[in-house]
Amino acid sequence: MAIIHSGDIVYVKRTGYRHFGIYTGDAQVIHYHKERNPLLSDGIIAETTLAEFKGSSDTIYVLNATTPAGTALFDWLVHRLAGGDVELFSPQETVTRARSKLGEHGYSLLLNNCEHFALWCKTGIAQSAQTDYLLECLQMLMPPLPQNKED
């Protein structure tokens, strides 16, 4: 397992998606917590144990710009979401921002998911590369709209 520091974005791989949160220290993570179906039910932003966050996943990953394992994905996300020009909040400010959302509901797979939350805490940008990619794929599958031609 990677070394995790307070204020790091952490994630686990689940079937079909990655689940993100903010590590707050003392084996605690703030994230969208769902007790039932994680894709369909509403969630609440909660601070849980690292073990509860991990669930049945084998590995916890750290998404940051300081370790080789996290740099490539983090750089890709920053480039994709903000054209590569993003300021990172300090670890303390990242945790403060995460704690400011504790107890909030409003989960939306496409508009307000765990990745939106974690990236907002760290960068101020609430976007999700996972859902952006999903929407791009769906657009490719949709037939083109008919165009009106004036005679």
Image: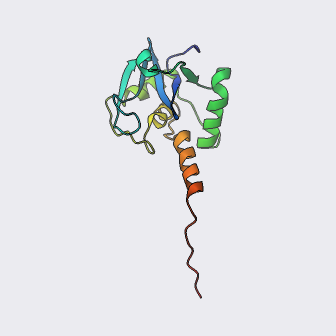
How far across and how far down the image is residue 52, in percent? Answer: 40, 19
Instruction: Work out which quarter of the rendered image holds the C terminus and state it.
Output: bottom right
How far across and how far down the image is residue 146, in percent? Answer: 56, 72
Specify whether 48 is left or right of 78. left
Using the image, determine if residue 74 lies above or below residue 4: below
Instruction: Work out which quarter of the rendered image holds the N terminus and state it.
Output: top right
Using the image, determine if residue 30 lies above or below residue 3: below
Residue positioned most to the bottom: 151
Q: How many marks?
A: 0
Q: Nearer the viewer, residue 60 or 123?
A: 60
How far across and how far down the image is residue 60, in percent? Answer: 53, 20
Q: Is residue 23 visible?
A: yes
Residue 49 falls in image quadrant: top left
Using the image, determine if residue 69 lies above or below residue 127: above
Specify whether 49 is left or right of 64. left
Q: Nearer the viewer, residue 101 or 45?
A: 45
| Residue found 67% across the figure and 29% down from its top | 72
| Residue found 53% across the figure and 18% down from its top | 58
Residue positioned most to the top: 26
Q: Nearer the viewer, residue 141 or 108?
A: 141
| Residue found 58% across the figure and 42% down from its top | 81
How far across and how far down the image is residue 133, in percent? Answer: 57, 45
